[in-house]
Amino acid sequence: MRAILQRVKASWVLVDGVEVGRIGMGVNVLLGIGKGDNEEDAKKLADKILNLRIFEDERGKFQHSLLDIKGSALIIPQFTLYASIKKGRRPSFEQAEEPVRAEKLYNYFVEVMSQKVPVSTGRFGANMEVHIVNWGPVTVFLDSKEL
């Protein structure tokens, strides 16, 4: 499982011009599910995101986690995180999990995160317009296979 994590002041997502999710201070998570990913990957990645100290203390040091600041998460499904550009100019998505299984793991990840922080989501399989008010900006790439 892969994630692009962005610290945000606010983030929201539209589908067909209709807002389907919004958060204030917290993290925007673009989440990709790869072949072979499982519930253990989802738990590891969620735990890392929840506890990653990317929020500053009064001295400007990264000391606080999403849990510490009582922030929220906007989780957007993003199969293109498994794009391969080794051959040609068109990305291949062979390493992305097939949609039915990927959606189940996406929903499981959302459920795990929701147990600890308020969560909003995009819509799996939809063409989304994601608005991100970056804070910093702070952007981190995470891969469950490397945790």
Image (tube, rainbow, N blue to C red):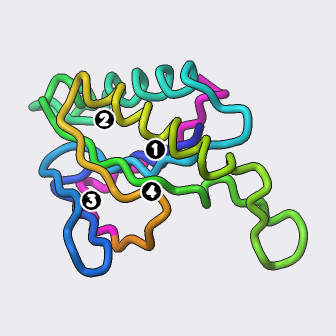
Between marks 1 and 4, how big is the CA–CA gap? 22 Å
* Amino acid at the residue labelled 2: Ile
- Residue at far left of view: 58
Where residue 70 sits in the image (x, y, percent)? 12, 30
Residue at image coords 61%, 41% = 101
Task: Give the camera-side residue of 73 and 100.
Answer: 100
Between marks 2 and 1, how big is the CA–CA gap? 9 Å
Q: Identify the residue under disc 4.
A: 124
Give yes or no for contact between labels 1 and 4 (Cβ–Cβ under 8 Å): no
Mark earlier in primary sequence (4, 3): 4
Mark earlier in primary sequence (2, 4): 2
Where residue 117 sits in the image (x, y, percent)? 20, 30
Mark earlier in primary sequence (2, 1): 2
Query: What numbered label is drawn on residue 134?
Result: 3
Give yes or no for contact between labels 4 and 3 (Cβ–Cβ under 8 Å): no
Between marks 1 and 3, how big is the CA–CA gap? 12 Å
Mark in front: 2 vs 4: 4
- From the viewer's perspective, is residue 56 above or below residue 116? below
What is the crowding at mark 3: few (fewer than 14 residues within 10 Å), some, or many (at least 20)? some
Between marks 3 and 2, how big is the CA–CA gap? 13 Å
Q: Identify the residue under disc 2.
A: 54
